[in-house]
Image (cartoon, rainbow, N blue to C red):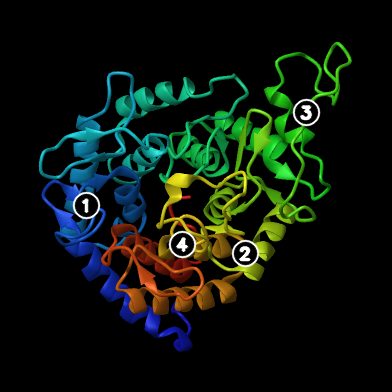
Amino acid sequence: MSIAPQMSIVDDVYAEATASLHRCCTPEGVRASAGKSGHTQVWTRDAMIALLGGALSGDDVIGNALQASLDLLRSKQSATGAIPNNVDSKTLRPNFRAYADSGLWWIIGSVITNRDDDTIDRILAWYKCQDVDQAGLLSMQESSDWQDLFCTRGKGLYLNCLYVLALDAAGRHEHAHRVRDKINEYFWYRGDGDLLPHVRHTFSTESVQEQDSLGRRRWLPVKQTLVDQQYYLPWLAFRACGEWFDTLGHCLAILANVPDGQRANVSADFIRKHGIHAIHPPVQPGDPDWRDYYGMLNLPGQYHNGGIWPFIGAFWVAALVRLGQQAEAEQALETLAKLNRLGDFNEWHDGLTGEPKGCPDQAWSSGMYLYAWHCVRERNTIHF
């Protein structure tokens, strides 16, 4: 199947993406960025997300670096089974701070390239312990997933959709199905202003009503943002929840077959309307999800707080392919090609101006472009 003629730029950028990812490759593994000024560690999520497309490139240098990444990260697995957030490419010291999603991405990467069931079993045993309240979903501390400088906490949408993908990759299909059901039960907001269904599982007594077992009225959060919209909430914690729209979380939900057809289309319509921003709307100073540590990096429209990330744009292309929207996926791929060319496969772009920000030659920006290209070409969400 050839790509439509009007999309010829996508082939040129494919070659550029291959060269960019090539520059991230080292004997230790795929660094998050190329060059001395970039992120020189082997980051698990960056390398494994880059692997989705890199494994399809047919480039031996990229393939060898991807396998080296898997080997290095596995060698630093903790005694309890956790895969590190990153490993310094010079000192080989592991870092476990933003720990929540690393093992799940490692499972997916291992299954794609060189399956290691013993390590997968140890990782999943560790994740079983992250279902801290036995609700059937993973929990995490604040700023512990890919948004490692943001307020996401508790049960995260992105994290649990990724859990479904990893469980399916590992062949735990019944478990994956149970997690899908829990995501739909707890996260889907119906646009009715009622947040009780999303927090009642955190109650410490058997009553799940607005009154406790002694008849006392409970305090419940009041919906303030996107009140009339239907979507998956970004995180759930103790009698609290996020209210912004998590674009990556919804793309992964579609790829993981979490929503039914109606919910998938509602989610896609939201993205079409508001664009490929990390979140929408951005968190503003004074909002419950604002943090002083955001500093200058996570101002509204910047970085995690509404910035534009090319790798998320590639997941959007894949989600459109999954939804059968081939013509729209081709158009989105062309838009992504132009964005990546503008920023030399930058880490992210300003959510208001589109200006390239962060480091150029970002492995997951280039690797995910390769993945999106193959998805469109083959009309299939490869690996998922």
Circle 2 sits on which residue?
271
Give the amino acid type for the residue marked by disc 4 in the picture: Gln
Q: Position of residue 151 (x, y in %)?
A: 51, 42
* Secondary structure found at label 1: strand
Q: From the viewer's perspective, is the residue at label 4 or at label 2 nearer?
A: 4
User: Which residue is drawn at the image coordinates 27% and 75% (left, top)?
Assistant: 15
> Could you tell me which secondary element the residue under label 4 belongs to?
loop
Of badges 1 and 4, nearer the viewer stands: 4
Label 1–label 4 contact, CB within 8 A? no
Cα separation, mark 4 vs mark 3, equals 33 Å
Distance of label 3 from label 1 (alpha carbons): 48 Å
Per the rendering, the mark at residue 219 is: 3
Alpha carbons under labels 1 and 2: distance apart: 30 Å
Find residue 339 and report its image quarter.
bottom left
Q: CA distance from mark 4 to mark 2?
A: 18 Å
Is residue 245 shown left or right of residue 49? right
Please name whichever residue, 153 or 222, is drawn nearer the observer in this view of the structure. 222
CA distance separating discs 3 and 2? 32 Å
Q: Residue at x 55, y 32 (%)?
A: 154
Tell me which label, 1 or 4, sits earlier in the chain.
1
- Location of mark 1 (residue): 30
Q: Nearer the viewer, mark 3 or mark 1?
A: 3
Q: Which residue is mark 4?
A: 302
Residue 141 x %, y %:
47, 31
Picture coordinates of residue 322 (x, y %)?
A: 57, 59
Q: Quadrant of the N terminus?
A: bottom left
Label 1 environment density (alpha carbons within 10 Å; few <14, some 14–19, many ≥20): many
